[in-house]
């Protein structure tokens, strides 16, 4: 029984991490793309739905284990592959079914627990802020970099010059050509 409890605890930890990631992404999309301020009230239904969706996945996996166990019962021949179960596999399939069901049950309990939802949302908010903070720091570091502070400046100078010639100057030339072509019809009509 301890093995099931450990597997369920591990499954719940993985599911919490997946839910936190989904909530973090939702917070980032709402904040950045939709210019919405962070709101616990807006995130709670999303967090609950994320947990319930994960619970539904676990229930579906438990149902699959149950079907595979019933199909394997009484088969004693050699299996044809990884998922071609036989009677000797039924004990393991029953254990996996219980583990999936246990994770689903734990997720549903978490989805109905306001304190667990709040903690999950706070963790997701902190992760979202960490992403924003690291992106800002990286951008400020790159944009505020001076050649004397960059240890790779000399080594990367050739690649930057080549990119300038092949990409930036070609793009500038094409832009100027388009501007000139757009201005020529206006001159002809005058």
Image (cartoon, grey):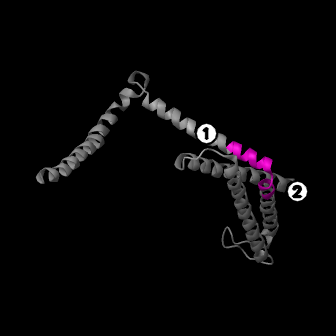
Q: In this view, does 96 lie above or below 27?
A: below
Q: How many marks?
A: 2
Q: In this view, does 148 lie above or below 71?
A: above
Q: For residue 116: magenta?
A: yes
Q: Position of residue 134 (x, y in %)?
A: 55, 36
Label 2 neighbourhood size at 10 Å, few (<14), some (14-19), many (20+)? few
- Nearest to the observer: residue 105 or residue 72: 105
- Nearest to the observer: residue 90 or residue 58: 58
Q: Where is residue 81 in the image (x, y as percent from the top left)?
A: 66, 70
For residue 18, the mark is: none
Q: Which residue is drawn at 13% across and 50% down?
A: 187
Q: Where is residue 172 in the image (x, y as percent from the top left)?
A: 26, 42
Counting residues from the start of the chain, the first of labels 2 and 1 encountered is 2
Q: Where is residue 158 in the image (x, y as percent from the top left)?
A: 32, 33
Q: Helix or strand or loop: what does disc 1 sit on?
A: helix
Label 1 neighbourhood size at 10 Å, few (<14), some (14-19), many (20+)? some
Q: Helix or strand or loop: what does disc 2 sit on?
A: loop
Quarter of the figure with the N terminus: bottom right
The residue that label 1 is drawn on is: 129
| Image quarter of residue 143 | top left
Tell which tag, 2 or 1, sits nearer the viewer: 1
Q: How far apart are marks 2 and 1 (CA)?
A: 40 Å
The residue that label 2 is drawn on is: 1
- Nearest to the observer: residue 79 or residue 41: 41
Q: For residue 185: magenta?
A: no
Q: Which residue is drawn at 82% across and 63% down?
A: 98
* Residue range of the region highlighted in magenta in the rendering: 108-123
- Name the dominant secondary structure of the magenta segment: helix
């Amino acid at each position: 029984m301890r093995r099931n409890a450990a597997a369920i605890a591990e499954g719940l930890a993985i599911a919490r991490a997946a839910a936190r990631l989904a909530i973090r992404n939702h917070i980032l999309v709402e904040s950045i793309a939709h210019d919405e301020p962070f709101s616990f009230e807006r995130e709670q239904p999303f967090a609950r739905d994320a947990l319930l969706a994960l619970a539904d996945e676990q229930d579906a996996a438990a149902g699959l284990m149950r079907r595979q166990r019933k199909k394997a019962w009484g088969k004693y021949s050699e299996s044809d592959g990884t998922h071609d179960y036989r009677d000797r596999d039924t004990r393991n399939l029953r254990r996996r079914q219980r583990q999936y069901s246990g994770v689903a049950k734990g997720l549903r309990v978490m989805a109905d627990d306001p304190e667990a939802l709040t903690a999950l949302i706070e963790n997701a908010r902190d992760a979202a802020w960490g992403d924003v903070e690291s992106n800002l720091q990286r951008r400020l570091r790159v944009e505020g970099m001076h050649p004397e502070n960059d240890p790779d400046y000399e080594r990367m100078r050739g690649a930057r010059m080549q990119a300038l010639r092949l990409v930036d100057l070609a793009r500038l030339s094409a832009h100027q050509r388009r501007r000139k072509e757009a201005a020529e019809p206006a001159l002809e009509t005058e």
